[in-house]
Image (cartoon, rainbow, N blue to C red):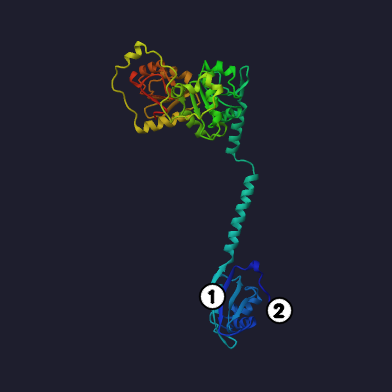
Amino acid sequence: MKMGKISPVSAKYIIHAAINIEGVVDKPDVIGAIFGQTEGLLGADLEYRELQRSGRIGRIEVNVETKGGKTGGAIIIPSSLDKAETAIIGAALEIIQRIGPCNAKIKVENIEDVRVSKRQFVIERAKELLKQLMETSLPDSQELTDEVTYSVRVMEIQEYGKDRLPCGPSIEESNEIIVVEGRADVLNLLKHGLKNCIAINGTAVPETLIELSKKKVVTAFVDGDRGGDLIIKELLATADIDYFTKAPDGKEVEELQKKEIHKALRSRIAAEQIKAEAPERYSARNAASEEPEVVRVAPPLRLQPVSQPVEDRSMQRMRVEPRKRQPTANERKIFREMAEDLIGTRGAYVLDDKLDILGKVPITELQSTIKNLSSVYAVVFDGVIDKDLVRVTERTNVQFLVAMDSKVKPQETRVGILTINEL
């Protein structure tokens, strides 16, 4: 009767054994010894011949090589038995001590679980399939939300003035604006929620922007390259610019992430400071003819407004005041986080003494809101602290005013005044 053999696909375990023989033998001698010397040892159910006939073990593979009168090699037996039975028939190999006329020694080195390697293959293949699926499947809800939000903000881009300059929708109503180099810069700022931006749209400063700069507080935000330096010179020579800031070295405004944009805006410096550092470099005479030099933006500092208003008598009286309360470390941390969150929004957070937000309002409604609330502890807003706001907060016992900048010195009021750079 022809013996059946197990399909390699159905094997669960593979027995690996090493064989060493003191003499020269052939493969049939080894296989004959395995069947002959284990016969009757394990009972009828675990006879090697019967197991192979029923397909529960596969074809026994013997690979031997003779060197120097000795034979060595390996025995491989696939098995579909359970763990215990496979271990028993593997151990039975080690009772063989002679093959033909020669002494022999068989040592089972390990029993391989075929399912482990198959499982590893399944895992690796599943990773490849999942990657393909993720690359071709529909976006999740967050991706859809981000895409729609970005599309809406891009749709918000408008044109301003006779020069048709690309700008955000808040360019008219905002008291402060951000001037960038091109349309792509405007789109990136809109993407990150800054709607009060406008582009020069070229190397020459257009008349529309020159006129607009006379009515607004202007921050110029240029690329971190030599082209950005040239734009700074041109703006200083032709327009009424209040502050300047640059993208990180080698980067353009259009490629910045939200955190980088806010960091650059917090690090802006006053135009007067640039002129004071090297006035001859920024004169109208030199702007068009001189080879542009790199303008190094100074580290974050307290922003100084273009001009300080003359103090009136009421502000002078504020100098005589009781000792004001100082913010705790935790309060400073929360104020800073809220201020960063408000950059470019022209909004304000009104807080109670637990630093919970009572409401968020446009800064145009800030004074009326403070007058109508009796429990305001602090106000954090995207704007500049002025005398009118200080008067209102003093009457309503507000403890702290936190803003992007201040036209009122801390010693002129009993309200605690903090700017984002001081935090």
Q: Is residue 33 above or below residue 319?
A: below
Identify the residue at image location x=32%, y=27%.
Answer: 326
Q: Position of residue 13 (x, y in %)?
A: 58, 69
Labels 2, 1: front one: 1
Q: Residue at x 63, y 20 (%)?
A: 164
Give the crowd class for mark 1: few <14, some 14-19, many >=20 residues within 10 Å.
some
Q: Which residue position is annotated with label 2? A: 2
Image quadrant in which the N terminus is located: bottom right
Task: Specify whether 5 is left or right of 93.
Answer: right
Answer left or right for 205 relative to 404: right
Mark on residue 79? Answer: none
Q: Residue at x 37, y 30 (%)?
A: 354
Instruction: Say if residue 89 shows up in the picture.
Output: no
Residue 89 lies, in percent from the top left, at 56, 76
Q: Which quadrant, please, contains the C terminus?
A: top left
Provide the residue designation for mark 1.
108
SS under mark 2 = loop
Farthest residue in the bottom direction?
Answer: 101
Chain-order first, disc 2 or disc 1: 2
Q: Residue 277 location, x and y as percent? A: 44, 24
Task: Give the amino acid at mark 2.
Answer: Lys
Alpha-carbon span between mark 2 and mark 1:
28 Å
